Image (cartoon, rainbow, N blue to C red):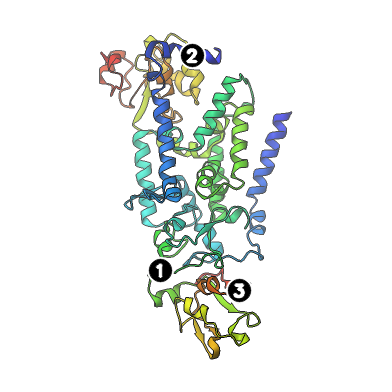
């Protein structure tokens, strides 16, 4: 009897873990703001291609790529992600180079290719928090941006303006001296 | 069946402790060194191997991929990069040479867990348990492949205890612990060698190249068998021994040809009569005088 209960429990557990609907519903947690590595395909396609080999994180010289446990649903288990405020992407493009399944596309490390091929998200400035918009000249985000005057332009008092060319690497968010940060990346899950 | 303490005792007495544990020790060192090679990078920054058992790159030149994962990925509708495909071919060729399920006993990290469960089970004398068919694993293998085909993702790999354990050691173990503990308790209390010997679809997959693989265990000197049963007690796939060991009167050769033999070599260790040794599948004549043809490790057996 005990055995039967156990096997039933195992079966129920497996069924729960496997049911595609359950996986789908667990897929998206809006409160969790994370980025996929640069060149990652659209979320659905990315999850389907990634074989969780962990080579992207090991290739990352900046060690900004981390791996999900179950906090973003079972479907995201052991997939790579970046929390830009903790450590942002330096756009070295090594992760796409080593990815064996092209879940992260290989993109050459050139400004043009990166601007057209990478769309991890886009920076958004909160003018209520940003120092420069409070009249205190700052400009730290502009100096941290790997694509200055392309992704971020600054105006009077170094007030940042984000353009469509922003690839969402998160270096601005990482460097913002305000707490909480006045500039943050709104993730893009649709690929480039 | 014998008391636990007596199993393998005769071999230790006649051969000495070290020769009676030779293959077990080699196997454990193989499993541990592979694990350490993967962990050297993330833990100590020494990058010999990058990646994990799903797909890896050794010394920046040698790509290795798990052909089972690659197959699931392809069924999910994705063609991996050519290096990953090449890696899968390299791995397949290796196991065609060394025995398909050599993966299970020489590489798989979960083997240490299930062997411990099996050892503990014998030690504390747990008998009986559920009778699951050893064919179940092939059904599960089919289910995992169909899952990949219909879901368009490598869904099985998310919960596969083998991948979970290996990835957990590299990425940090989340709910993986629960899965590993479930396998351990299942093997300990519910079914003897339940996971590896009956359910595991990874083993089932690797048994397929084992249908043709070259390196095999052979009961070369089977006429010396004194029916002590020690090999049956320690073997994780007991059903594979009998046809070869007791096949002389049925005109069946001495080579263990079952694809589910894991080439663990534990039978060689525990046999006091030196009945078994590693050889190739081709030296399988029923005439026992051909033993000189064997690629032998035990010179005194041959002479």
Q: What number is the disc on residue B229?
A: 2
Q: Is residue B264 at least partly visible in the picture?
A: yes
Left or right, B202 with reference to B63: right
Which residue carries the number 1 mark?
A107
Q: Nearer the viewer, residue A92 or B287?
A: A92
Q: Position of residue B273 (x, y in %)?
A: 38, 11
**Which label number is shown at residue B147?**
none
Residue reaching furthest front? A136
Q: Establish if A104 lies above or below B237.
A: below
Q: Nearer the viewer, mark 2 or mark 1?
A: 1
Tell me how far mark 2 sits from mark 1, CA to CA.
61 Å
Q: Secondary structure at mark 1?
A: loop
Please tell me in which quadrant of the rendered image residue A56 appears: bottom left
The disc placed on residue A181 is 3
- In terms of depth relative to the viewer, which is nearer, A22 or A166? A166
Relative to residue B145, is residue B21 drawn left or right? Answer: left
The quarter in which the N terminus of chain B is drawn is top right
Q: Residue furthest right?
A: A1
Q: Is residue B257 visible?
A: no
Q: Nearer the viewer, residue A41 or B48?
A: B48
Q: Residue furthest bottom?
A: A156
- Residues packed near mark 2 inside 10 Å, few (<14), some (14 to 19) or many (20 plus): some
- The chain to which mark 3 is attached is A
Q: Is residue B113 above or below residue B152?
A: above
Residue occupying the point 36% across, 34% down:
B98
Secondary element type, mark 2:
loop
């Amino acid at each position: 009897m005990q055995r039967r209960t156990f096997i039933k429990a195992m079966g129920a557990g497996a069924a729960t873990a496997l049911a595609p609907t359950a996986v789908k519903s667990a897929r998206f947690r809006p409160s969790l703001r994370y980025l996929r590595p640069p060149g990652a395909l659209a979320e659905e396609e990315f999850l389907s291609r990634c074989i969780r080999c962990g080579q992207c994180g090991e290739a990352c010289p900046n060690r900004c790529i981390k791996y999900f446990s179950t906090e973003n649903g079972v479907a995201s288990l052991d997939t790579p992600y970046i929390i830009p405020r903790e450590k942002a992407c330096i756009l070295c493009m090594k992760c796409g180079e080593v990815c064996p399944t092209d879940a992260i596309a290989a993109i050459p490390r050139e400004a043009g290719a990166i601007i057209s091929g990478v769309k991890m998200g886009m920076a958004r400035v909160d003018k209520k928090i940003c120092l420069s918009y409070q009249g205190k000249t700052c400009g730290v985000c502009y100096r941290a941006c790997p694509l200055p005057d392309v992704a971020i332009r600054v105006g009077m008092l170094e007030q940042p303006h984000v353009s469509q060319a922003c690839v969402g690497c998160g270096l601005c968010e990482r460097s913002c001296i305000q707490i909480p940060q006045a500039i943050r990346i709104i993730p893009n899950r649709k690929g480039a | 069946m014998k008391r636990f303490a007596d199993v393998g005792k005769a071999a230790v007495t006649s051969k000495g402790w070290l020769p009676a544990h030779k293959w077990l020790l080699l196997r454990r060192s193989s499993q541990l060194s592979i694990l350490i090679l993967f962990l050297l990078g993330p833990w100590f920054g020494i990058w010999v191997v990058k990646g994990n058992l799903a797909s890896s790159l050794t010394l920046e030149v040698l790509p290795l991929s798990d052909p089972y994962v690659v197959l699931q990925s392809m069924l999910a509708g994705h063609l991996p990069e050519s290096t990953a495909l090449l890696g899968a071919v390299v791995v397949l060729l290796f196991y065609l040479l060394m025995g398909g399920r050599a993966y299970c006993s020489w590489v798989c990290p979960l083997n240490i867990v299930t062997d411990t469960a099996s050892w503990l089970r014998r030690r504390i004398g747990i008998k009986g348990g559920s009778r699951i068919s050893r064919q179940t694993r092939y059904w599960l293998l089919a289910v995992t492949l169909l899952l990949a085909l219909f879901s368009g993702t490598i869904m099985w790999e998310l919960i596969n205890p083998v991948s979970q354990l290996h990835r957990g050691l590299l990425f940090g173990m989340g709910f993986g612990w629960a899965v590993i503990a479930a396998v351990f308790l299942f093997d300990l209390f519910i079914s003897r060698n339940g996971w590896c010997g009956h359910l595991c679809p990874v083993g089932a997959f690797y048994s397929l190249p084992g249908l043709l693989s070259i390196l095999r265990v052979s009961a070369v000197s089977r006429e010396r068998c004194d029916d002590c049963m020690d090999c049956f007690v320690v073997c994780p796939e007991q059903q594979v021994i009998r046809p070869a060991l007791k096949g002389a009167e049925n005109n069946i050769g001495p080579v263990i040809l079952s694809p589910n033999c894991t080439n663990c070599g534990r039978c060689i260790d525990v046999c006091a009569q030196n009945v078994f040794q590693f050889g190739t599948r081709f030296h399988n004549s029923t005439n026992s005088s051909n033993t000189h043809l064997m690629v032998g490790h035990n010179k005194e057996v041959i002479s």
